[in-house]
Amino acid sequence: MAVQQNKKSASRRGQRRAHDFLANPALTTEPTSGEAHLRHNVSPNGFYRGKKVVATKSDE
């Protein structure tokens, strides 16, 4: 049976558990297309804050 040689400190234990309580990424809905995307990022349709900022293939 495996037995630890030295006690793990509270600091090391906390470092290991640092990612256990991460929240889901914050999503927002684009007002023009109604599509969900990451906050402060351009939506897949090329809209940012209600304005078309990137040309997409579907625009052609």
Image (cartoon, helix red, strand yellow):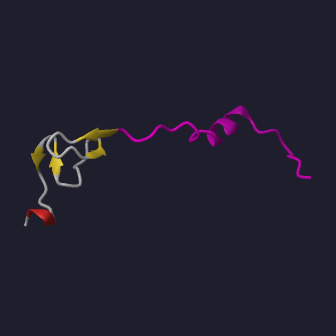
The region drawn magenta spans 1-26
Examine the rendered structure and indicate whether residue 57 appears above or below residue 20: below
Q: Quadrant of residue 24?
A: top left
- For the point 63% across and 39% down, the residue is 17
Q: Nearer the viewer, residue 37 or 35?
A: 35
Q: Nearer the viewer, residue 8 or 26?
A: 26
Q: Is residue 11 left or right of residue 47?
A: right
- Looking at the image, the residue that sits furthest to the front is 34
**Horizontal and vertical percent position of residue 22:** 51, 38
Image quadrant assignment for residue 14: top right
Q: Quadrant of the C terminus?
A: bottom left
Left or right side of 34 for 5: right
Extreme-left residue of the structure? 60
Name the spot of residue 44 as percent of width and height, x first.
23, 55
Q: Is residue 39 magenta?
A: no
Residue 25: quarter of image: top left
Q: What secondary structure is the magenta-colored segment mainly?
A: loop
Q: How many marks?
A: 0
On the image, the x and y values in percent for residue 5 come to 87, 46
Against 47, residue 20 (above or below) is above
Residue drawn 55% across the image and 36% down it: 21
Which sits in the foreground, 6 or 44? 44
Foreground: 55 or 10?
Answer: 55
Residue at image location 17% in from the left, 46% down from the top: 33
Residue located farthest toward the top when viewing the structure as drawn: 10
Query: What's the residue at 77%, 39% (across, down)?
Result: 8
Question: Would you place residue 29 above or below residue 45 in this image?
Answer: above
